[in-house]
Amino acid sequence: MNLQQLRIVRETVRRQFNLTEVASALCTAQSGVSRHIKDLEDELGVELFTRRGKRLLGLTAPGQELLPIVERLLLDLQNIKRLGEQFAQQDTGHLAIATTHTQARYALPPVVTGFKSHFPRVHLELHQCSPREIVERLRSGEADIGIATEALADEPDLVSFPFYAWRHALIVPEGHPLTAAGPLTLETIAEYPLITYHPGYTGRARIDAAFARAGLAPEIVMSALDADVIKAYVELGLGVGLIAAMAWHPARDAGLRLIEAPDLFETNTARLGLRRGRYLRDYALSFIRACAPELTADRIREAVFPKTAV
Amino acid sequence: MNLQQLRIVRETVRRQFNLTEVASALCTAQSGVSRHIKDLEDELGVELFTRRGKRLLGLTAPGQELLPIVERLLLDLQNIKRLGEQFAQQDTGHLAIATTHTQARYALPPVVTGFKSHFPRVHLELHQCSPREIVERLRSGEADIGIATEALADEPDLVSFPFYAWRHALIVPEGHPLTAAGPLTLETIAEYPLITYHPGYTGRARIDAAFARAGLAPEIVMSALDADVIKAYVELGLGVGLIAAMAWHPARDAGLRLIEAPDLFETNTARLGLRRGRYLRDYALSFIRACAPELTADRIREAVFPKTAV
DNA sequence: GATGCTTACGATACCCGTAAAGATA
DNA sequence: TATCTTTACGGGTATCGTAAGCATC
């Protein structure tokens, strides 16, 4: 048995059993990929992949049991490398953050600025993606840290920590009748065409839930992935907007007015997500600490490597 | 990086940094061991071992952090092999049990008999050893299952389950004055020279604790590793014996009398111990189930591979 | 016919083992 | 001096890549 064989098994599943792709992903020749799979199956005495003729289709029962073990083993292999880098060059390396528009634009800039000055020799990569993609990137190892309001809390192979709490608020064009009305209610909002986030993004579920609980069905004329698009169309008069409150900037958004809606929608919590069992460089822990001071290195390491798991 | 390198790192620590021994343990040449260590250190960019001149002395800080990762990785490698065997030959293989005299002699015979008839093609090895050695054998992978009253419950890298509860009782020669006396007390026992287990064996700690709580200091004239030795010397009249109650057999121990001591000493619990994260063959799970029917395969696997650890 | 997997084959690189030299106790 | 580690060197093997042959879609 051999590490390359295990890498190939993992990659084969990731590439939907297309060995040609596997070979190119691992920078090697297809022939070797085929051989390695065959050799491994021979050594274990078990077929790992189901086949139709020569094509691979999926995992057999033993293959399915094997996969998580292989994944963890390769994770540990990465951890060993990372540990080497950690000691070899304390403050040099990469840090990949996967995050949503909202966090990248409104929550992270001060953290990133501080980080860059503290760790000038760390190459920081910020990848903007959807919450689902963030989870995938954490899982595959492309990202060290994921930051989003959605999706991070419910994955068994991730750990997540609260970053900060935020609320939705209404934005309307300057001079809109709602700026003169009394305290907001869901009913009054629902009288106007609505522009807000796409489902699965930035607390949209909370918005839908609030209206549903109130027995209201507002007309959502547009859904967008980020507040900037929403603001643009509110400004055009397409409707009123529901966005994360921190996305409104008094000076920059001069043509718009923000109306707080403190109790209409449930609080959202942006979270920091990490892959369980993945070794984190010290500067990654510093980044997290800069987001949430209560997250000490010890607390994070204990969550990522629970003592009981050894 | 390479599996052999990692095996060498682990073995080097196990063999107290004597590379010659490491080589022979891994069936290879010293020269290769040296070079592999050097290569790995070069690749990671970090010294893993402290040295005086050419001799290795111990682990550096990075080496200490590395070791548990390597151990887990190699455990997973074993798990992969075991998983192959599991599917390739369902009911054929090895099962190594490490246990104490008391369990081997009095608790396990019926379980072993049943197991042998159910799994005739499994090679069952029973190793009798001390509680500390059981822990070591589980840790090193020499044993699949450990069974003892002592030591198993407190190791963070092991999981343990209760097997059965038992109590100490007194044995005396036939016709001894205590056979005629009323209910036993610690005070009356302490009037006689005592023969019992060696510290660290078969609930000896409970015996000491009971006497200490009562402010008594009995004269222990002999301590032995097993009940058979104790019984022999009790029969010779050296003193009265305190043994595990199940070690007394009315027919075989005709010259002795057992006097129950239900409330004098705390109950002991024999436990089954497993290495966390180690894959178990189905027949190993069956063995455990035969010991304690409430320990289903699912319950054991969940304890050995907690879901949260992935 | 296009894509994808297997097998064959030659070159390369890696790993191992022997042996000699140097260090340590 | 005996034990242990490193370095050098040669042989063997495993792995890789190219390329051809086949199966699948």
Image (spheres, coloured by chain):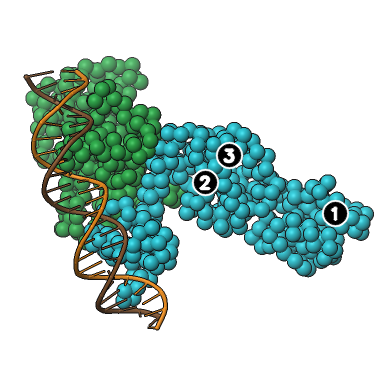
Chain colours: A green, B cyan, C brown, D orange
Question: Residue B162 falls in which quadrant of the image?
Answer: top right
Q: Earlier in the sequence, mark 1 or mark 2?
A: 2
User: Badges 1 and 2: C-beta atoms under 8 Å apart?
Assistant: no
Foreground: A124 or B40? B40
Q: Chain of mark 2?
A: B
Residue at image mark 2? B144
Position of C8 relative to B159 (above/below): above
Question: Residue A51 falls in which quadrant of the image?
Answer: top left
Mark 1 → mark 2, Cα distance in angstroms: 37 Å
Q: Is residue B192 visible?
A: yes
Residue at image mark 1? B256
Is residue A179 shown left or right of residue B124?
Answer: left
Q: In which quadrant of the rendered image does the C terminus of chain B lie?
A: top left
Foreground: A256 or B111? B111
Q: Residue at 51% across / 34% down in the picture?
A: B91
Q: Earlier in the sequence, mark 3 or mark 1?
A: 1
Residue at image mark 3? B288
